Amino acid sequence: MMPMLLPMLVQFKFISCVAYMKKLWPFALFTVLLLQGCFSALTTGTSAVYDRHNLQNNISDHAIAMAIDQKIKSDAVFSQSDIKVTCFKHYVLLTGETSSNLLRKKVADIAAHIKDVKHVYNFVENHARSTTAEELSDTWLTAKIKTQIIAGAKMDPKDVKVVTENGTIYLMGVLTHKQADIAVNIARYTGGAKHVVKIFDYIIYSKT
């Protein structure tokens, strides 16, 4: 009779094991879900920090540009000038037209003394103001080039800024060298573009 007991014993142990696993599976599932939740929370938290940092930068850039613009407009000597202020990551780009080299230097000095400005790129020119047709053409070029750059370089729209003044394309951004090359080539070969000026911070990846 002993040979018959061994299969029964094995079967009993197997059934007991299955029953034990059935009791444990809710706890195992809970552990998996908890780990997934922690990972998701970590990822979401990292994304939230990145987005918050970007938002703070955007608000700060806007405040800097507004402060410079208000100082220019409040000074009567610039009443015949048409100066555009662009700020990206606390770097200021000045474009447009004014009537003298003295005013050109003065507007750069105004921008440089605004709090948190890292550097001023002064491309204001001494000649007559742009016509409405020229400004419309610049606006169209800016929209067209930025759309193509975002698609071609596969990048976040917040990482690049495109400014057009009298057919000259100014590119500002935080890019890899590959993205920068794509952006410059797109701008350079877009119909209507006369010149391309790049103001980039480069992202460099290094192996550790």
Image (cartoon, rainbow, N blue to C red):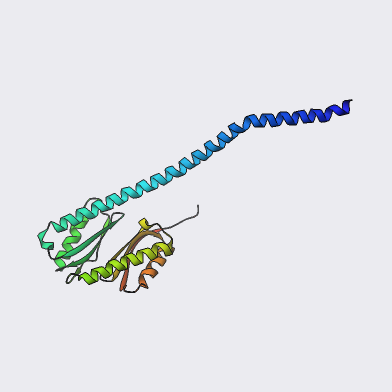
Residue 56 x/y as whole percent: 31, 48
Residue drawn where x is 40% and y is 45% of the image: 48
Asked if residue 20 is positioned above or below residue 76 in the image, the reply reads: above
Residue 196 x/y as whole percent: 32, 69
Residue drawn where x is 41% and y is 66% of the image: 182
Could you tell whether 93 is left or right of 144 in the image? left
Residue 113 in view in this figure = no
Could you tell whether 202 is left or right of 7 in the image? left
Residue drawn where x is 25% and y is 71% of the image: 166
Residue 24 in view in this figure = yes
Residue drawn where x is 50% and y is 39% of the image: 37
Among the 4 quarters of the image, the one containing residue 22: top right
Give 32 or 63, whichever is nearer the viewer: 32
Q: Quadrant of the N terminus?
A: top right
Question: Quick one: which residue is furthest to the top in this view?
Answer: 1
Residue 105 x/y as whole percent: 17, 63
Asked if residue 189 is positioned above or below residue 60 in the image, the reply reads: below
Among the 4 quarters of the image, the one containing residue 87: bottom left
Could you tell whether 21 is left or right of 203 in the image? right
